[in-house]
Amino acid sequence: MALIVVFVLAFVVPNILGSESSNGGSDVSDEQRAANATTAASLSDFDVVCGTGSVSNAAPYEKPYSIAAFHQGTAENDWDAVTLDNQADYVADRSNLTSINVVACLTRKDGTEVKSGTCEFGSGGEQVAADHYAVEYDLELREAKTGKAITNLGTVNGPATRCPFIAYFDENDPEIFGSPDPAAVEDKLAEFAAQ
């Protein structure tokens, strides 16, 4: 009986985690986000807002906006920072974490993958190939302090024109995806910040 329970738990838990992370945490309740609040010590800590949490030391959601941006990495629950133009007024200041009040979450849009080629990487003295895909990303804004959804700004392209210098991928399913076009992300964020 104990073996059956362990098997069922082992099967159910990954499915629950997979469903929360693959959609940017949109199925997570406000209570769950509050319970998963963390204190940010660096800009990268704000990626929790794109998953299932919030940032307790973030600023309240109001103008002026201070926006940090992350895109879904190769793994469903990995979030990578999007480098934005530091000259824009709405871009989060790494040296003032408590001023950040909005997080932009860019999630890969299923069914938009287009194979652009193959990339070769050295790993442990061997060459490993990974399929490289262009993809579209949904751009959703969330309140940093609560994790609540603000709005969806539509989609941006993730072109796969060049192989990255370093990539992380599952060796059993070697796929990598183009990063969101930073200029397109900046255009959408600037339009939002100007409202």
Image (cartoon, grey):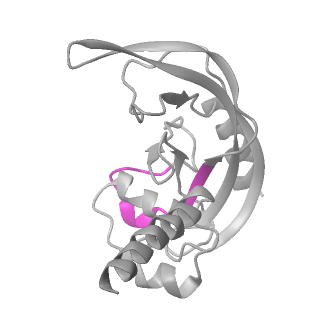
Q: Residue at x 54, y 13 (%)?
A: 118
Establish if 51 lies above or below 156: below
Q: Position of residue 191 (x, y in %)?
A: 76, 47
Q: Give, as a single range, the part of the protein colored magenta.
A: 92-106
Q: Quadrant of residue 151?
A: bottom right
Does residue 178 belong to the magenta stretch? no
Is residue 101 in view? no
**Residue situated in front as seen by the camera: 163 or 189:** 163
Drawn side of residue 98 relative to residue 179, left or right: left
Q: Quadrant of residue 131?
A: top right
**Residue situated in front as seen by the camera: 36 or 114:** 114
Quarter occupied by the N terminus: bottom left
Q: Residue at x 59, y 72 (%)?
A: 61
Q: Quadrant of residue 137?
A: top right
**Residue situated in front as seen by the camera: 117 or 8:** 8
Q: Residue at x 31, y 85 (%)?
A: 2
Establish if 77 lies above or below 160: below
Does residue 102 belong to the magenta stretch? yes
Q: Position of residue 66 (x, y in %)?
A: 53, 57
Quarter occupied by the C terminus: bottom right
Establish if 115 lies above or below 6: above
Q: Position of residue 35 (x, y in %)?
A: 42, 84
